[in-house]
Amino acid sequence: MKVSSRGEYALRALLVLGQSCGEVLTIGEIADMTLVSCNYLEQIMLQLKNLGYVRSKRGMNGGYMLRTSPKGICIGDVIRNLEGPLSPMSCASVTAYEPCPLEAACMLQPLWILVRETVARVLDETTLDDLITGAVVTRSGGKIIESSHDG
Amino acid sequence: MKVSSRGEYALRALLVLGQSCGEVLTIGEIADMTLVSCNYLEQIMLQLKNLGYVRSKRGMNGGYMLRTSPKGICIGDVIRNLEGPLSPMSCASVTAYEPCPLEAACMLQPLWILVRETVARVLDETTLDDLITGAVVTRSGGKIIESSHDG
DNA sequence: ACCATCTTGAGCATATTGGTCGTGATTCAT
DNA sequence: ATGAATCACGACCAATATGCTCAAGATGGT
């Protein structure tokens, strides 16, 4: 149930851009702030550009800036675009559905659908702006603690 | 955010054992019912045995059986044992916490904690018996449909 | 012209995934 | 006792994904 480093790095980059409200940041500056290698970050920024999240400006005084307001950037979409479907199993995916060979006899599909629904609900209700303003509220209040159980 | 085939296969095996209430099933029978290759399934069954979910009996008329009742098998635990922490990022993991280099400045941790909390809630509240009896209830009623958004 | 900067594609080491296969070790039926 | 059935265990392997590095090109400002 992991998010890859690429997805994490992309979100970090979007966050620093979102916090710099419209300012242009170079790869080097973003790399410093996100603690991601410049070379690797280049790839990620390119992808974010192609996905329409950022604009770039070449040449002197160039760099990257957010294309839209942080309120308009849905975290669920960012993760889908960078990491693929949210569904833990393709038999429960909206965007990449594939039938499972067990078909009707499969007792797991409802579980995977439920997981996908709940994850999607959380991530789709969160915008970049929510992350910046700290509007993400956990049940534990941000502590890493098993409420009764956990992982 | 994937579950690997190994985890899916393990759950399938537990399901067929759970449905055979105490009967001993050979690897071959389980393989047939789960559509998993016999050789690969061996590895998985061995792991399930070492984890305490199943018992095995060698020799003629041997095979596998569930060690405990399906009601006592928590899906969250099964997945943790087979796939590692539920948390999408180690900075939010209860069972395998590792600090992120951004530390306090990281605006993503609350999100990852929230995701982990919600996934853990779903998986820890579900038992093998729930899967067998069809007690898993999705908001969409089992349809793969974007409620407003999804993945 | 020149330099800062993004752009692009190649390449690469490592880990993970998803297996196969062969050889034992047990146990039961006969 | 013997042999067949069955699990146990470890070696091995191919394909893919991950997480990068690097070099060379394109572009724009001064």
Image (cartoon, coloured by chain):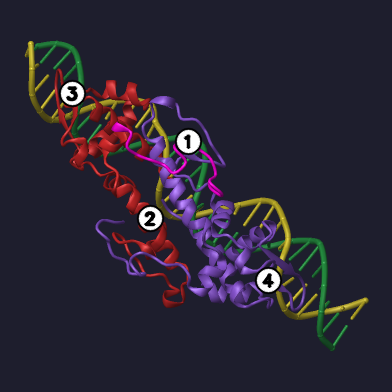
Chain colours: A red, B purple, C green, D yellow
**Res. A119 visible in picture:** yes
Q: Gap in Å between the C-alphas at discs 3 and 2?
A: 36 Å
Q: Which of the labelled discs sits on residue A24, or is there none? A: 3
Q: Within 10 Å of the Cα at label 3, are there few (<14), some (14-19), or many (20+) other Cα atoms?
A: some
Chain of the residue where label 3 is placed in the rendered structure: A
Q: In front here: A8 or B18?
A: B18
Chain of the residue where label 1 is placed in the rendered structure: B
**Which callout, 2 or 1, points to the residue nearer the camera?**
2
Q: Within 10 Å of the Cα at label 2, are there few (<14), some (14-19), or many (20+) other Cα atoms?
A: many
Residue at the location (49% across, 38% down)? B90
Considering only vertical position in the picture, is B29 above or below B92? below
Q: Which of the labelled discs sits on residue B11, or is there none? A: none
Whichever of callouts 3 and 2 sits on the residue coming sooner in the sequence is: 3
Q: Position of residue C29 (x, y in %)?
A: 81, 85
- Say yes or no: labels 4 and 2 on the same chain: no
Left or right: D10 as drawn, with respect to B119: right
Disc 1: which residue: B91
Q: Within 10 Å of the Cα at label 4, are there few (<14), some (14-19), or many (20+) other Cα atoms?
A: many
Disc 2: which residue: A118
| Magenta stretch, residue numbers | A133-151
Q: Position of residue C25 (x, y in %)?
A: 81, 62
Disc 4: which residue: B65
**Which callout, 4 or 2, points to the residue nearer the camera?**
2
Decide whether the magenta segment is chiefly helix, strand or loop: loop
Q: Position of residue B66 (x, y in %)?
A: 67, 69
Tell me the kind of residue under disc 4: Met
Tell me the kind of residue under disc 2: Thr
Q: Gap in Å between the C-alphas at discs 2 and 1?
A: 21 Å
Q: Secondary structure at mark 1?
A: helix
Q: Secondary structure at mark 3?
A: loop
Chain of the residue where label 4 is placed in the rendered structure: B
Q: Position of residue B130 (x, y in %)?
A: 52, 68
